[in-house]
Image (cartoon, helix red, strand yellow):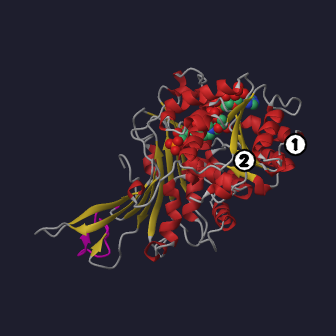
Amino acid sequence: MTDPGDTPPTVFVLFGASGDLAARLVLPAFFRLAQEELLPPQWQLIGSGRRKLSDDDFRAHVHEKLTEFGPKPDDGPWEEFASRLHFASDGFSVDDPGRLVEKVEQAEQELGDGDPSSVQRVHYLGVPPTAFGPTTEALGAHGLAERSRVVYEKPFGTSLESFRKLDEAVHQVYDESFVYRIDHFLGKEATQQLRALRFANGLFGSSWDRHHVASVQIDVPETLDVADRAEFYDETGAVLDMLVTHLFQVAAEIAMEPPATLSSDDIAQARADAVKAFRPLATSDVIRGQFDGYRDIDAVAEDSDTETFVAARMYVDTDRWRDVPFLMRTGKKMAESHQKVSLIMRDPEGGPYCAPGDTGNPECADIPQRGNVIRFDLSGDGELGISMNIELPGSQSELTTQWTTIPLHDVHGGDPLPPYVRLIHDILLGDRTLFTRPDGLEDVWEAAGAALDGSAELHSYEPGSWGPREALQLAEPVGWTLGDQ
Ligand SMILES: NC(=O)C1=CN([C@@H]2O[C@H](COP(=O)(O)OP(=O)(O)OC[C@H]3O[C@@H](n4cnc5c(N)ncnc54)[C@H](OP(=O)(O)O)[C@@H]3O)[C@@H](O)[C@H]2O)C=CC1
Ligand SMILES: O=C1O[C@H](COP(=O)(O)O)[C@@H](O)[C@H](O)[C@H]1O
């Protein structure tokens, strides 16, 4: 991580500071950054909300949430951290800025060492998506957009139309270079490894195409329920919550052509170009599912047809990936929780070994199915894995599949960080590499095709299963590498 020592004094405004995202992800990330000494030398955080809270009330709230979600305040430096927390009550809108403008001015007087205009502002919109537009407009109207970066949570739009409307509203106030749209899967440690493994290793870079890869799988089953956020979930569903956001961005990281450099512009451009090449999903390429019992949850409509599961088979229309299925799957209340990205390598041809059932050479010896896989585990600190077919040591002549793994927390000298810690650090330093751009997002809606247009049938599935049976057929002939293939 880059030393933040040169970062100017910073006022960080957290809209939605009393909400769930702030409690579970943003405030813990801030505290971790303080622990790692990765915050600017001079900073203050102002929570913003419609309720009335004093600074001390807010500090008590943050203490309670850190105690619940970690890192624990007792691990320090809590007192120092708490002294930099403030709260601006009474909301923030074009008509009424509440207490926010005066709180920001006060912070800038304290931080600016006689020059408040030397203080940079970061506005983090941890509010419901419907509040993105009005809050941005209010930032412009009350002069708080000056000297600032603005951060949007996902989803940034729920359709092409709402995306364009929001994008226009944001650009009325902000130049694109100051806008940071979060997709936290891009901030995961193992996602960074996709680029490193491929572009820094000739062995893998030369295999990264349709000649060597039979199928790409981005598999994110979750055992998680939705009962504690049912209202949000019933309006959103798995396609918007996960598929066209996180899974598509990871697919773009895999599918991208080599960027000219590692600059943030080149990488974001490569990712955006990859999304542009996604072929719109056809109805036969999408399986939507809903777990049995979903409609009995409070706050879920009795006749809800929101999907809690989606599997999709996408093709990327570039010469590199022609005819290689990108299989994506995610759902709630499934059998197991994983976040695994796998490149399943093609079986060898023309030699003494071949795939089971290969009729070309009746003499050849069978190799294990899906024996050669490059895998990225995005969960937790992340892990890389490669499976190979090797000769079983001993007297018998037999192949077996063996995995070799690199858990990222074991890498000597490394210090894996949770995605929100990494992303907030990048925002403070002005590095936009891991954030989405409007050109990349606009094409997402086109690619979503049948996943969003309502043409894909809704199947039911048993809680604790791997989803509807139909999703298994989607992955044939290679099959999913997880679960009951
Ligand atoms: N929770 C999560 O795990 C994740 C959330 N997100 C995204 O983060 C954002 C916030 O999510 P979450 O914290 O769960 O949501 P919440 O419903 O908890 O809302 C956050 C806060 O925003 C304020 N708020 C609510 N409605 C409005 C409004 N109309 N205008 C202004 N402020 C409002 C409320 O504070 P007050 O009443 O004090 O004003 C509330 O506490 C959303 O965009 C969500 O999609 C993204 C990934 C994960
Ligand atoms: O954004 C979201 O992501 C989580 C899964 O990601 P994790 O890294 O927090 O495990 C998902 O459960 C949630 O539904 C979705 O909104």
> In the depicted view, which residue is nearer to us: 399 or 30?
30
Q: Which amino acid does label 1 sit on?
A: Gly
Q: Does the magenta stretch include residue 470?
A: no
Q: Is mark 1 on a helix, strand or loop?
A: loop
The structure residue drawn at horizontal position 40% and vertical position 34%, both measured from the top left corner, is: 464
Mark 2 = which residue? 10
* Residue 434 percent location from the top left of the image: 62, 56
Name the kind of residue labelled 2 in the image. Answer: Thr
Asked if one can make out residue 306 in the rendered structure from this viewpoint, the answer is: no
Tag 2 secondary structure:
strand
The foreground one among 270 and 369 is 270
**Callout 2: 10 Å neighbours few (<14), some, many (20+)?**
many
Res 238 quadrant in image: top right
Q: In which quarter of the image is residue 135?
A: top right
Q: Can residue 195 be seen in this view?
A: yes
Please give the label number shown on residue 79: none
In the displayed structure image, the side of residue 219 where residue 183 appears, left or right = right
Vertical side of 52 occupied by 95: above or below:
below
Measure the C-alpha gap from mark 2 to mark 1: 16 Å
Q: Name the residue under label 1.
A: 143
Ligand 2 image-quadrant field = top right
- Above or below, 58 against 252 in this view is above
The quarter of the picture where the N terminus appears is bottom right
Left or right: where does residue 148 sit relative to residue 312? right
Q: Residue furthest front?
A: 114
